[in-house]
């Protein structure tokens, strides 16, 4: 498969483009209008806010179906400290199950990529970064919050400038120790919250980093909860495939 990187199609109209069997990684379709398309056997995942297919807004339908399949998802939308604490406890239990499943595999399997997505270890490293961005940088206002083993998507164009080492190769147990520390931080932060604190607007430090915009504490925690849920789903999807491979 031919790989094309760094192309910017923002504001461009594509005529008769053929994406059959193509793989688009981390594309931005914000404000995009697609007409007369064929999505036969397509598999789409991502944030669906405002997406309409044939005039129907898709996100509420998808959310309702996911809630039906996974009733515990509703906890992620909690808006008070007790509800957030319950949501985090649920996610901790989910990740305990995920870790037990992963640790039953040979350690090299935890570094395997499926369809060039992040490995299990890289997923844990990304969740470390998500906590650094949304809890340590934004809520706790730390100017240099980033652990050097964090893993980011292409949206973070210069991770080294933030103290992140894109060439680091920590072991699974080393990553797990850092990850557990970040999980404890989130739990302790939620336990110390009041209802009024959730509405506090957090302005990130002037130091370079992500995010740059101001957000409420509640918004930041919702981002963390959703990151944990989504990447748990991705990790289990890939573990299914890895476990099915002959060894």
Image (cartoon, rainbow, N blue to C red):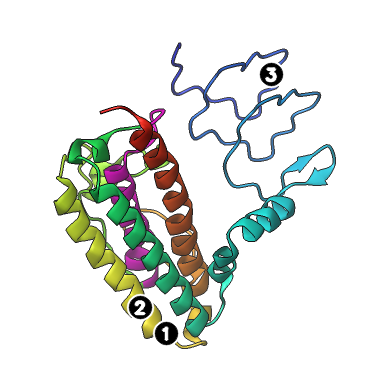
Give the quadrant of residue 133: bottom left
Q: CA distance from mark 2 to mark 3?
A: 47 Å
Mark 3–mark 1 CB contact (< 8 Å): no
Is there any visible trace of residue 147 in the rendered image? yes
The residue sitting at 60% across, 65% down in the picture is 71
- Give the residue at mark 2: 189
- Image quadrant for the N terminus? top left
The residue sitting at 31% across, 44% down in the picture is 120
Q: Earlier in the sequence, mark 3 or mark 1?
A: 3
Disc number for residue 193: 1
- Give the residue at mark 3: 14
- Image quadrant for the C terminus? top left
The residue sitting at 34% across, 75% down in the picture is 187
Instruction: Please tell me how crowded label 3 is: few (under 14), some (14-19), or many (20+) other residues with Cα within 10 Å.
Output: few
Is residue 234 found inside the magenta-colored segment of the image?
no
Nearer the camera: disc 2 or disc 3? 2
Principal secondary structure, stretch drawn in magenta: helix
- Height in image: 183 above or below 33? below
Give the quadrant of residue 122: top left
Residue 9 in the image, given as x and y percentages of width and height = 59, 25
Secondary structure under the numbered disc 1 in the rendered image = loop
- Height in image: 52 above or below 192? above
Mark 2–mark 1 CB contact (< 8 Å): yes
Q: CA distance from mark 2 to mark 1?
A: 7 Å
Secondary structure under the numbered disc 2 in the rendered image = helix
Which region shows up in magenta?
Answer: 114-139
Left or right for 115, reference 12: left
């Amino acid at each position: 498969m031919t790989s094309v990187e760094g192309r910017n199609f923002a504001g461009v109209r594509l005529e008769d483009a053929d994406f059959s069997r193509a793989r688009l990684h981390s594309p931005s379709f914000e404000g995009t209008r697609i007409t007369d398309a064929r999505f036969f056997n397509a598999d789409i995942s991502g944030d669906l806010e405002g997406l309409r297919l044939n005039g129907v807004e898709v996100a509420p339908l998808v959310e309702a179906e996911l809630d039906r399949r996974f009733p515990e998802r509703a906890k992620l939308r909690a808006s008070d400290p007790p509800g957030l604490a319950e949501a985090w406890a649920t996610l901790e239990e989910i990740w305990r199950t995920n870790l037990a499943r992963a640790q039953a595999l040979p350690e090299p399997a935890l570094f395997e990529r499926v369809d060039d997505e992040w490995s299990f270890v890289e997923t844990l490293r990304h969740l470390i970064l998500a906590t650094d961005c949304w809890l340590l940088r934004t809520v706790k206002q730390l100017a240099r919050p980033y652990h050097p083993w964090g893993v980011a998507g292409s949206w973070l164009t210069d991770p080294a400038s933030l103290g992140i080492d894109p060439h680091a190769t920590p072991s699974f147990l080393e990553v797990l120790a850092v990850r557990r520390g970040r999980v404890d931080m989130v739990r302790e932060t939620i336990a110390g919250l009041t209802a009024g604190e959730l509405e506090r607007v957090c302005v990130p430090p002037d130091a370079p980093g992500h995010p740059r915009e101001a957000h409420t504490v509640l918004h930041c925690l919702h981002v963390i909860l959703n990151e944990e849920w989504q990447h748990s789903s991705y990790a289990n999807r890939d573990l299914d495939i890895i476990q099915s491979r002959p060894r």
